């Protein structure tokens, strides 16, 4: 019986194009000014030091650090320091009303229905936890943060590693057989299944071909495994 649902964001609750064509370019454009203004901020410096460790580069100036983060954005690197700083930058965009987070038309209703049925809802995304809270706090469906019992990001591990799902299962405190993970990425679902999770592949465009996991094109099609 499913007691909790853990959902991915990009390509699952929301379009890939919103993340790649709105959020990523916004962060890439804002990085130089943000780092120049916040260079002495302790939380920012901590992430710059973590980026130095991950890249093996010395980042002595905001310009050097911006260049590295912009390169990582162009490569869609799921690096924790990049994701943390992106979250800080996106906060301004949400608060200024520059954008709201895209949700597919079925997402908010399905989440509300599941919650009403007594299921606990969680997010697992490569975006940082503060970025996830902003995403669902300033979404096209309004503030949905009250629906979620918790959030997981790359600090729980890489999304394609089974151990990450074991870490999440331990944090949620339910047996893996009671957990359902939703994602558009086969390798993420494979890792979750290896950890014993139920899995459903969300193929929003209906174009991803065969899968080892049950496939839906909309949350409305999801029938929870008993
Ligand atoms: C929290 S919104 C931004 C999502 C993001 O930065 C990203 O890399 C998408 O990763 P996901 O794991 O949701 O596919
Ligand atoms: Mg995804």
Image (cartoon, rainbow, N blue to C red):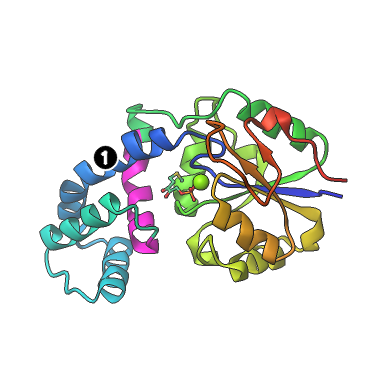
Q: Mark 1: give few (<14), some (14-19) or many (20+) Cα within 10 Å.
A: some
Q: In this view, does 1 lie to the left or right of 72?
A: right
Magenta span: helix, strand or loop, mainly? helix
Q: Residue 114 sits in which quadrant?
A: top right
Residue beneath label 1, please?
Answer: 25
Q: Where is residue 219 in the image (x, y as percent from the top left)?
A: 67, 32
The span shown in magenta is 79-93
The reply to whether residue 171 is visible in this rendering is no
Whether residue 127 is situated above or below residue 203 in the rendered picture = below
Residue pictured at 33% horizontal, 34% vertical: 22
| Magenta highlight on residue 91 | yes
On screen, residue 56 above or below 44: below
Question: In the image shown, does 183 or 29 lie closer to the viewer?
Answer: 183
x, y percentage for residue 82? Answer: 33, 58
Toward the top, the furthest residue is 105
Count of numbered badges drawn on the protein = 1
Q: Is residue 68 visible?
A: yes
């Amino acid at each position: 019986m499913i007691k909790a649902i853990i959902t991915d964001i990009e390509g699952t609750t929301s379009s890939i194009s919103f993340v790649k064509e709105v959020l990523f370019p916004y962060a890439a454009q804002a990085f130089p000014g943000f780092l120049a203004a916040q260079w002495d901020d302790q939380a920012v410096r901590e992430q710059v030091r973590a980026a130095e460790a991950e890249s093996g580069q010395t980042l002595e100036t905001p310009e050097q650090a911006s260049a590295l983060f912009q390169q990582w954005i162009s490569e869609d690197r799921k690096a924790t320091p990049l994701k943390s700083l992106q979250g800080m930058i996106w906060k301004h965009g949400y608060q200024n009303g520059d954008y709201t987070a895209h949700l597919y038309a079925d997402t908010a209703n399905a989440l509300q229905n599941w919650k009403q049925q007594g299921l606990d809802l969680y997010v697992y995304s490569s975006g940082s936890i503060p970025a996830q809270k902003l995403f669902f706090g300033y979404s096209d469906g309004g503030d949905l943060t009250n629906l979620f019992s918790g959030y997981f990001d790359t600090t729980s591990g890489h999304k394609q590693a089974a151990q990450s799902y074991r870490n999440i299962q331990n944090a949620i405190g339910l047996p893996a057989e009671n957990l359902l993970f939703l994602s558009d990425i086969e390798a993420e679902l494979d890792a979750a299944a290896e950890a014993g999770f139920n899995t459903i592949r969300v193929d929003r465009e209906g174009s991803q071909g065969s899968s080892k996991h049950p496939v839906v094109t909309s949350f409305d099609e999801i029938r929870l495994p008993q």
